[in-house]
Image (cartoon, helix red, strand yellow):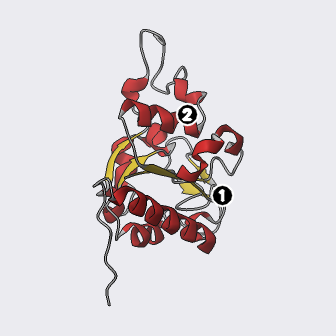
Amino acid sequence: MIIFLDFDGVLHPDAVFKPAKKPIELRLPGQLMMHAQILENILNPFDVSIVLSTSWVRSIGFYKTLKSMPTELARRVIGATWHSEMVDKTVYPYASVKYAADPFNYWSRFQQIDHYVVRNSVKNWLAIDDLHSGTEIEKWPLNIRDNLVLTDGVKGLGCPDTQKDLINKLFNFKIIHSSEGHYKKQEKDD
């Protein structure tokens, strides 16, 4: 299974800014990646990989984004929904280093994830995202809303209800797909 992971509004509040020539900063109480340990603990019993669906990749690059993550989460990362090669120079010949003509500027988070899913023939996936603090929820198709763990943009994974939603969806995927050989059903320890 693949988890499409947003950072802002998930691993910390959605109040992150990247000032020119300065590191990324959080402008609310707390710290960057403050809920990362919660995600690590939840994912621990599951065989899941992570694909980064965060704007950090476009802002600071894939490898710097990876280095900003706790080691245990970073080990699960297999890619990102966006990379610099996606800017088609034949369609966008004047795309600058800042990717002004990048189609990702106009795609919703769902469209970005769907592009990755289709391109890579992904069958089993969940997205953990605040959808820009809920402003993009109408752009997420109803028929696959079960693939979304929608977080509160301020609380992120610090919200117990969101944690429960993620755990339930992970277990549901595991049980549903165990008969297909994708996952082994965990035995309860007595």
Tell me where residue 185 appears, x and y as whole percent. 32, 68
Residue visible at 49% across and 25% down in the picture: 99
Q: Is residue 174 visible?
A: yes
The location of residue 62, given as percent across then percent down, is 37, 42
Q: Residue at x 40, y 68 (%)?
A: 40
Circles 1 and 2: CB distance less than 8 Å? Answer: no
10 Å neighbourhood of mark 2: few (<14), some, or many (≥20)?
Answer: some
Q: Is residue 141 left or right of residue 73?
A: right
Q: Which mark is residue 153?
A: 1
Q: Nearer the viewer, residue 141 or 154?
A: 141
Secondary element type, mark 2: helix
Q: Position of residue 139 (x, y in %)?
A: 66, 38
Residue drawn at x 48%, y 13% as measured from the top left: 92
Frontmost residue, 87 versus 159: 159
Q: Nearer the viewer, mark 1 or mark 2?
A: 2
| In the depicted structure, whether residue 123 falls above or below residue 49 | above
How far is disc 1 from disc 2 in space, using C-alphas? 20 Å
Return the residue at label 2: 111
